[in-house]
Amino acid sequence: MMKRRIYALFLAMVLIISFCGCSEEENEHEEIISGGEIILEPVESSSSSSSEPEIPTGTEPAWVPESSSESSSEEIAESSSASSSEAEEPEEKTDCSVLILVNPWNYIPEDYDVNLVNVQGKYNLDEKAAESAKELVAAARKAGFDMVLCSAYRTVEKSAELYSRKVNQFINAGYDEATAKIEAAKWVAPPGTSEHHTGLAMDLVSSDYWGYYSDLEHAYENFDSFKWLYEHCAEFGFILRYPKDKQDITGITYEPWHYRYVGKEAAQYIMENGLCLEEYLELIK
Ligand SMILES: [Zn+2]
């Protein structure tokens, strides 16, 4: 019975995927970024748990707000057909472009476009995620949590800037260039590998967090707002993108503040089953 249900679910997913032509989203574009070598464990944000005694202080943390103003408008190929022949689940308008995989091994496609919509302050997300993000923030507020974004859409150029600044810090601290690049990648995702390029990811914590910390740290998991986010993010199509127990798969250390929009259906499956996006994509392949 259960098996049949799972099989039907997979079948439905396969149908949806093939229908939307997602596969092209998952192409690797490793050649885009010059100087981007294989990084084993890049971390796109700084964290207290890393042991890097020589890291120069007083520098811009990885999450530092960036001005994101460039937006390119283009039509989003949205498959609005609600064809569900044998799918058990209610057909939901599934745009599988929101399942794009960007990680240390999968660069953002060179021609990837976003259509930015303001979410909060100066932070923008792609139109596919922006409204859901606003709804999430509003729901959190109702629950008593004042959620503050500290990063959202980020250009490849901005990442390049943050990354090279970090590389220089390591070089100035005495590292050779090759090692500096590797070390820097543990703090700032090399350009092209940050999920923030998709406009589908945001970093957020509750405002009370800043009363205790001045940087994004793993300790955020101890805040009630994190527990709320963890429990409710999927209702708005978001997932905790870098879970603590999936670091080997994601290539990114645990980030309790980083949430990624994947659509409600995928989000609920991922969060309910304790998966990371890489595992989910493997599953529905
Ligand atoms: Zn992030």
Image (cartoon, rainbow, N blue to C red):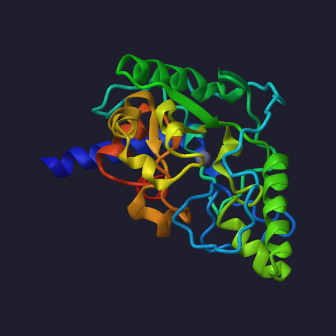
Question: In the figure, residue 275 lies in which quadrant?
Answer: bottom left
Q: Residue at x 19, y 52 (%)?
A: 3
Pick whichever, 130 or 108, lies toward us: 130
Of all residues, the one furthest to the left in this rendering is 1
Q: Residue at x 82, y 81 (%)?
A: 174
Tell how many labels: 0
Q: Residue at x 85, y 67 (%)?
A: 168
Q: Is residue 180 above or below residue 72?
A: below
Question: In the figure, residue 154 lies in which quadrant?
Answer: top right
Q: Is residue 103 left or right of residue 141?
A: right
Q: Position of residue 59 (x, y in %)?
A: 76, 55
Q: Is residue 189 left or right of residue 84?
A: right
Q: Position of residue 111 (x, y in %)?
A: 81, 44
Q: Position of residue 93 (x, y in %)?
A: 48, 25
- Residue 285 appears anywhere in the view: no
Question: In the figure, residue 185 lies in which quadrant?
Answer: bottom right
